[in-house]
Amino acid sequence: MNLPNKLTLGRIFVVPLFIVLYVTSYHMAAFILFVLASLTDLVDGQIARKYNLVSNFGKIMDPLADKILVYSAFCLMVENGLIPGWMLIVILTREFVVGGMRTVAASEGIVVAAGMSGKIKTVLQMIAVPMLLLVPFISWDYWLFASQIVLWASLVMTVYSGVEYVLQNRKVFTL
């Protein structure tokens, strides 16, 4: 297994530790772990492209690792009121629709690449989570507001990228 794939798996394997840190109120440690895990997403892709280590495993598992990490954090944040439950439902609905369409397309031998709007969505989500994790530590009133703006921007990009994905790949519905 190559280094980018090991980094991707590492991102998945730290999720239980992140959850334990968060639910036991070690939010700063959870913040640090989340940021480090998020950075592996950036690094694994760069290494894979630079050294021609792009693999089918990485193409599938890298975005899945991102989702597991980010949506685990979002679920925890619904519990303590940092994120409204309806927002998480919208985000997860987009992921299930896109994932289902990708599965159908793959069963027909069609590979659907991730679009730029989906990548922007992921980046915004990966910025929103650590910002929200820091809310208890930063007494600056505008921090919560700024973190909510990034969260809402990620929601807008989630919906936009989902609609864009469905429209661009509507042929999947006729398979």
Image (spheres, helix red, strand yellow):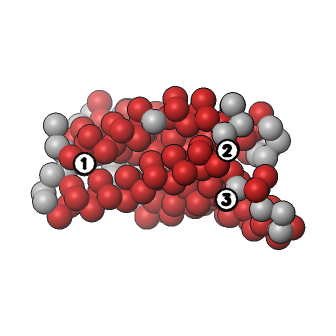
Q: In this rendering, would 76 be left or right of 124?
A: right
Check the image and report above or below for 118 versus 28: below
Quarter in which the N terminus is drawn: top left
Report the residue marked by disc 1. Answer: 4
Extreme residue in the right direction: 141
Looking at the image, residue 124 lies above or below residue 70:
below
Residue 133's x, y, as percent?
68, 51
Q: Which mark is residue 131?
A: 3
Q: Earlier in the sequence, mark 1 or mark 3?
A: 1
Mark 2 to mark 3: distance in Å? Answer: 12 Å
Q: Looking at the picture, which amino acid does disc 3 mark?
A: Met
Residue at x-position 78% and y-position 46% = 82
The C terminus lies in which quarter of the figure? top left
The residue nearer to you, when weighing 50 against 115, is: 50
Name the mark nearer the viewer: 2 or 3.
2
Are there few (<14), some (14-19), or many (20+) residues within 10 Å of tag 2?
Answer: many
Total marks shown come to: 3
Task: Assess whether mark 3 and mark 2 are in contact (beta carbons under 8 angstroms).
Answer: no
Percent x, y of residue 94: 58, 43
The residue at 25%/48% (across/down) is 4
Label 2's element? helix
**Residue at 45 percent of width and 48 percent of height:** 37
Q: Residue at x 51, y 60 (%)?
A: 123
Q: Amino acid at mark 2?
A: His
Say which residue label 2 marks. 27
**Amino acid carrying mark 1 in the image:** Pro
Which numbered disc flags the more N-terminal residue, 2 or 3?
A: 2
- Local secondary structure at mark 3: helix
